[in-house]
Image (cartoon, helix red, strand yellow):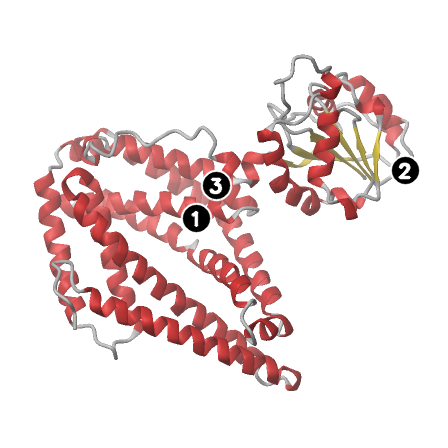
């Protein structure tokens, strides 16, 4: 079995008309594409074999941006690869020796047409900076044949970088001055399409921002459905919101690990804690947990049940019934539901004390989210309330993150506590845990003094 990696150069510049095609460099966007694709190149196995690059300026810049200089020992610049004819590439490959894998960095249409030749059905297009891996069932490169290859991987900058994905993003229907009640079906259609578009990035797992944005889209959709079902007591919407909730909850563990690993980088700068985190292997331990959770989530999002649930959700928000009930919503309906939720929240908030368990704060945090989501159905009417809720929600979120992180650290500490060579690491972890407990206590005090939503302090 042979493996062929095809890499198209990054987006090139046409700004200077005096330059020959061979001398054209990458433009700003082309340079921005390379950093995220560098992760792909290493993860895909490109570095396992020789890398051959066209001698065009844009191709050589792509090579430089994808592969660090210290890992570039097995690379060659070959003028023969500056071609737009796929037959030239086929002849070049057939003349190769017995390398198990070969990487070509070159140009379209040659690369795209080469893929079409080797695969029964190649991708519809080959965007700039994309990476394609093809498995070829041959022992020798001279045995290459039409349509015998198998596509193993195909990744574009949009699949692995949220920044690249989000270019030219369509805006949500309506505006900040238009009540959401007037365009709920359109807004949910937008969120649905956004979820589906984000799925590839979530499944690939190269950029944490995909998961963050996916969670926003699915939780916002669920919140709108839940809010409308509360106002209209609609059974179908209630069922649908519960289904969306389950899929959103399935992302929580990975999200917590992403936040934890990001904060761990900062904790390692602290005196004492940094040494303990390194010597105990905490970074590797939690990174492995995140990898396992990433694989589980990817399996879920590619499963039949998830696809069926998404199709049912799309059918519901596209139905006449849904459009009919949303057209009836008024600010008065939302105000009535809000008053009920705010009253329940304030009662619980006034019962909080310094001795209250963390679960009481978590319960209030969830109620606060539901209040905000309801108010967002008519932002022009409840704009001031939404501004006040944002600060509250941030504090509750900080408290919840610290609660989860302390739980993770304590479990890890306990797992290594009985190992004789980990005594100093355990002591360092205990010091970090104490610091985080102090931070959590400060956030708890801030929440207790915020007061209920009507403005009365809790203490």
Spatial separation of the CA atoms under disc 3 and disc 2: 38 Å
- Verify CB contact (< 8 Å) between mark 1 and mark 3: no
**Is residue 96 depicted above or below 226 in this figure?**
above
Q: Is residue 305 visible?
A: yes
Number of numbered discs overlaid on the protein picture: 3
Q: Is residue 318 visible?
A: no
Residue 22 image offset from top left, x and y in percent? 75, 19
- Verify CB contact (< 8 Å) between mark 3 and mark 2: no
> Residue 409 vs residue 193: left or right?
right
- Which residue bears the numbered disc 3? 199
Q: Nearer the viewer, residue 219 or 358?
A: 358
> Regarding mark 2 in the picture, which secondary structure is present there?
loop
Extreme-top residue of the structure:
18
- Which residue bears the numbered disc 1? 212
Q: Which mark is residue 98?
A: 2
Q: Nearer the viewer, residue 341 or 399?
A: 399
Comparing labels 2 and 1, the label whose residue is closer to the camera: 1
Q: Quadrant of the N terminus?
A: top right
Could you say which quadrant of the image residue 426 lies in?
Answer: bottom right
> Regarding mark 1 in the picture, which secondary structure is present there?
helix
> Regarding mark 3 in the picture, which secondary structure is present there?
helix
């Amino acid at each position: 079995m042979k493996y062929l990696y095809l890499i198209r150069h990054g987006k090139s510049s046409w700004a200077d008309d005096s330059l020959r095609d061979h001398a054209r460099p990458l433009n700003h966007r082309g340079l921005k594409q390379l950093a995220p694709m560098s992760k792909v190149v290493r993860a895909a196995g490109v570095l396992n074999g020789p890398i051959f690059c066209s001698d065009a300026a844009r191709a050589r810049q792509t090579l430089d941006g994808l592969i660090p200089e210290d890992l570039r020992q097995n690379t060659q610049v070959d003028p023969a690869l500056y071609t737009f004819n796929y037959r030239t590439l086929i002849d070049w490959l057939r003349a190769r020796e017995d390398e198990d894998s070969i990487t070509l960095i070159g140009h379209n249409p040659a690369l795209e047409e080469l893929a079409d030749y080797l695969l029964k059905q190649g991708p519809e297009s080959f965007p700039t900076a994309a990476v394609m891996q093809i498995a070829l069932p041959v022992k020798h490169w001279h045995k290459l044949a039409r349509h015998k290859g198998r596509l193993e991987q195909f990744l574009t900058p949009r699949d692995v970088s949220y920044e690249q994905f989000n270019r030219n993003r369509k805006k949500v229907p309506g505006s900040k001055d238009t009540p959401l009640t007037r365009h709920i079906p359109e807004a949910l259609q937008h969120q649905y399409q956004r979820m589906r578009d984000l799925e590839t990035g979530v499944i690939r797992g190269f950029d944490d921002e995909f998961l963050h944005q996916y969670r926003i889209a699915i939780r916002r959709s669920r919140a709108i459905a839940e809010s409308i079902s509360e106002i209209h007591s609609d059974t179908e919407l209630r069922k649908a919101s519960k289904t969306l909730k389950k899929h959103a909850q399935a992302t929580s563990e990975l999200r917590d690990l992403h936040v934890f690993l990001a904060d761990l980088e900062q904790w390692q700068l602290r005196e004492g804690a940094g040494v303990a985190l390194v010597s105990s292997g905490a970074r590797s331990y939690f990174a492995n947990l995140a990898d396992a959770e990433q694989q589980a989530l990817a399996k879920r999002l590619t499963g039949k049940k998830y696809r069926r649930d998404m199709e049912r959700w799309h059918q519901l928000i596209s139905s006449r019934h849904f459009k009919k009930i949303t057209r009836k919503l008024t600010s008065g309906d939302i105000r009535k539901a809000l008053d009920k939720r705010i009253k329940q929240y304030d009662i619980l908030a006034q019962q909080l004390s310094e001795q209250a368990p963390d679960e009481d704060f978590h319960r209030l945090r969830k109620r606060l989210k539901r209040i905000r989501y309801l108010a967002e159905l008519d932002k022009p009417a409840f704009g001031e309330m939404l501004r006040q809720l944002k600060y509250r929600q941030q504090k509750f979120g900080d408290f919840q993150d610290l609660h989860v992180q302390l739980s993770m650290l304590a479990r890890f500490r306990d797992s290594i506590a009985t190992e004789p060579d980990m005594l100093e690491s355990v002591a360092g972890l205990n010091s970090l845990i104490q610091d985080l407990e102090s931070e959590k206590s400060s956030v708890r005090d801030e929440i207790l003094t915020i007061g209920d939503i009507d403005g009365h302090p809790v203490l």
